[in-house]
Image: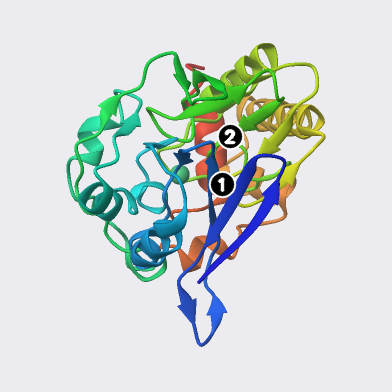
Amino acid sequence: MLETQNYDDVLQIRMSRAFNGQPLYWVAAYLVDGLLIDSGCQHTAQELLDFLSDHHVEQIVNTHYHEDHIAGNWLLHQQRQLPMYAHRDSLPLMRQVPTLYPYQEIVWGYPQPVEAQELGSVITTSQYTFDVLHTPGHCSGHVVLIEKQKGWCFSGDLFISERPKVLRPEENVHEIMASLQYLLSSAPEKFTLFTSMGQILPQGRQAVANLLSYLQSVTQQIIELHHSGHSIDDIRQRIFGGESRMAEVTNGQFSVNNLINSAITDGNL
Ligand SMILES: [Zn+2]
């Protein structure tokens, strides 16, 4: 299923596999002046292709290589010969079929391998110029796009919510914080945040700053407790009140433990 909304010159395209007529999990792509930012998952690839048949699309940029952001590429490239761009660290991962957990297969499916081209430091359309910021942490090869004149920031999966409790095992909370700081220092004073979860936040700077200060606070608490000799289980209970139910549903892929482990081990402590 697919839903759209307009915001200024930006068309948001939210996509989800339908289950008994209900959305399983929304992920958003954006179409701006012929530039498609991300392309959804395999289960919605045909629907996206059909929807875009009467839209002007010239090129695709993927914020990162995850299966819920790139799987529309293959059909769009086959049918419309659209060029695809991503950060160089994402390119080899987009050339192969990923290994997915059962929940990922059900919700998103396997993307077809594609041969994308390396993104430069900017990407332009006929009307707009987007700065490309390398923002690793959620994964390697993740980028954020910023259109400074318009005050638009397309954040991919760098921003999920202001107070996340779970991470994937490959995520690095220290890199995420560095990338959030980089975003804040590069973006105009006022900007609107367009997230992959489908939020459109006109007070984007405040939302990003809130996430950054939350992660700094939580990370500091975790490190202090760790240095005081507390176990992971004890830290999890004290700060977060226990493990998230997401951990069970996702085979431990999204868990509080991953956030705690990243805070302790990824900071070279
Ligand atoms: Zn992702």
Which element type, helix, strand or loop, lies under badge 2?
A: loop
Residue hosting label 2 = 155
Q: Residue at x 52, y 23 (%)?
A: 175
Q: Residue at x 62, y 23 (%)?
A: 147
In this view, the residue in front, 213 or 243, is: 213
- Colouring used for the render: rainbow
- Pointer 1: residues within 10 angstroms few (<14), some, or many (20+)? many
In this view, the residue in front, 39 or 252, is: 39
Q: Quadrant of residue 250?
A: bottom left
Q: Is mark 1 within 8 Å of ligand 1?
A: yes
Q: Position of residue 83 (x, y in %)?
A: 29, 35
**Upstream in the sequence, badge 2 or badge 1?**
2
- Whether the residues at callouts 2 and 1 have beta carbons within 8 Å, the answer is yes
Q: Is residue 96 left or right of residue 191?
A: left
Residue hosting label 1 = 196
Q: Quadrant of residue 163?
A: top right
Question: Is 96 located above or below residue 16 in the figure?
Answer: above
Q: Is residue 235 left or right of residue 203?
A: left
